[in-house]
Image (cartoon, rainbow, N blue to C red):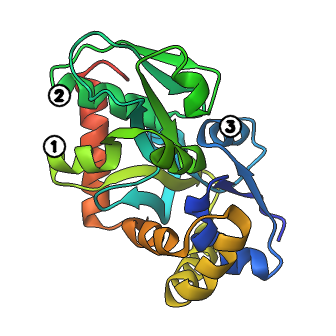
Amino acid sequence: MSIRIGKFGFVNNFLPYYWLEQNGIRVIEAPPKKLAEMFEKREIDFAPLPSFYYIKNKGKLRSYDFCIAARNSVLSVVLVSEGKMLDDDNGCIAVTSETVTSVNLLKIILMELGLKNRVVVMNESRASELLKHCTYALVIGDEAIKARTAYRVVMDLGEKWRELTDYPMVFGISASLSGKDMREVNRIVMESVEWGKENIDAVVAEAEKKFGMPVEFLHEYFKSLTYRVGAKERKGLELFEEKCHEYGLL
């Protein structure tokens, strides 16, 4: 396949792409922010783009069914600390530079809760390094999963968004440039998603080998995620866009 397909370079994209990659289709992986940059440079044709990037550029994009969303707790986008709960004491929050969507989601949540903690984006992905600079750290992806066992989880951003809006949080939505028709690629990706869901035990067994994460957690994690845009996911994405405008983030 000559189409260049991208994916988030995290365990959250392992299940949806597993069957695809097992059938010899090459997929390019990168952290969300890097993936958006590669798409911008026309190095990728189809990928789950970070939601903030998507809504900022949707005039030139075409979206599809595949997404990365959380029904409730996302488990891999978390605010952690060495023990302190979040309060309005002006303790700063160090944020990994790998995020495009989660940093703006955090800002929305803070403003919705009336908290004024300063958000500092840093060129680091590990919680241990981020916490050297601030009381709290926002980490994403596999690093967030690791941080859950080493630090206090102050907030799961997917869970908090659900509490505030009663809708799922969409962290990434598949897209191509508006002039490109990637419906066939989307169909193949969604076929891979369905295979992964139907054969979750096999996928989890392979994920355990690759990532060294407990089987029980991987089952819970994959089942907490939604990979198809439905009416609730679409509404959640619309609300995220509305809040970004309301708080001057767009």
| In the displayed structure image, the side of residue 96 where residue 116 appears, left or right | left
Q: Which mark is residue 34?
A: 3
Which callout, 1 or 3, points at the residue further toward the start of the chain? Answer: 3
Q: Residue sitting at 55 percent across and 69 percent down?
A: 214
**Percent coordinates x, y for residue 224 in the rendering:** 38, 66
Amino acid type shown at disc 2:
Glu
Q: Mark 2 vs mark 1: which is more N-terminal?
A: 2
Of 243 and 12, nearer the camera is 12
Q: Secondary structure beneath disc 2?
A: helix
Q: Nearer the viewer, mark 2 or mark 3?
A: 2
Residue 228 visible in the picture = no
Residue 164 is tagged as: 1
Q: What is the C-alpha distance between the residues marked 2 and 1?
A: 8 Å
Callouts 2 and 3 close, C-beta under 8 Å? no
Q: Quadrant of the C terminus?
A: top left
Q: x and y percent of residue 187 in the render?
A: 58, 77
Which label lies toward us, 1 or 3?
1
